[in-house]
Image (cartoon, coloured by chain):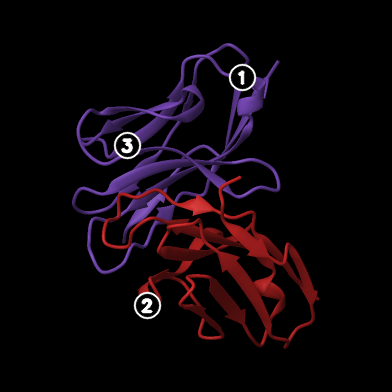
Chain colours: A red, B purple
Amino acid sequence: DSGVTQTPKHLITATGQRVTLRCSPRSGDLSVYWYQQSLDQGLQFLIQYYNGEERAKGNILERFSAQQFPDLHSELNLSSLELGDSALYFCASSVGGTSGSNEQFFGPGTRLTVL
Amino acid sequence: AQSVAQPEDQVNVAEGNPLTVKCTYSVSGNPYLFWYVQYPNRGLQFLLKYITGDNLVKGSYGFEAEFNKSQTSFHLKKPSALVSDSALYFCAVRPPYTGGFKTIFGAGTRLFVKA
């Protein structure tokens, strides 16, 4: 167990809908990262937050947004969902945000299925 | 463009034999290098990292990795494979810049260890 929790574990929804994925980092970790894992795209970095502020952006679509709250949990919002958004979404956390040498601890993931 | 290559989709090895999972990268500067393992229906788990110093890095579960700067490679190795090592292995690279930590993951290599 990495100490990172993600809810829900599975999510099934329809095209055009909006969903929210939730992540709680390990105790003491200030950085939260979101990743999308799909068969054709592999593991893609979406976005990073550090202590409530956006720190880095990857291949995140404009339909997607995220935030990190004062208690350090994070939410990833996916809107106007398309079939191609079906994937595993992972949250990861790390201790710091000012050093890139910290390893990340991954949650179990949320499997999103868009029908 | 910055990239990470894992040239083998799959590696097959007999239990007790040594294993190598290859990784090469194309990133300017001196990046931080990581290996993660993913078991079925689980999130990624950190195995080891190279930040600086000795080119041979030791990690969890008997794994080690050899950094070669001239070849820009970071191959994962284990002297004696176990059936329980069968999993998906990801090499990851983090460029050495501040302001954000976009980790670039390889496509993954599936390791099969046969009894």
Label of residue A53 in the image: 2
Q: Name the residue under label 3.
A: B73
Mark before the other along the chain sequence, 3 or 1: 3
Image quadrant containing the N terminus of chain A: top right
Q: Name the residue under label 1.
A: B82
Compare residues A6 and B82 and report the one nearer the observer.
A6
Q: Residues within 10 Å of mark 1 (few under 14, many from 20)?
A: some
Name the element at disc 2.
strand
Identity of the residue drawn at 39% across and 57% down: B103
Instruction: Point out the frontmost of discs 3 and 2.
Output: 2
Q: Work out whether B8 lies above or below B66.
A: below
Image quadrant containing the C terminus of chain A: bottom right
Kind of residue at badge 3: Ser
Identity of the residue drawn at 18% across and 52% down: B29
Q: Work out whether A66 lies above or below B31.
A: below
Question: In terms of image quadrants, where is residue A48?
Answer: bottom left
Compare residues A23 and B19 and report the one nearer the observer.
A23
Image mark 3: chain: B
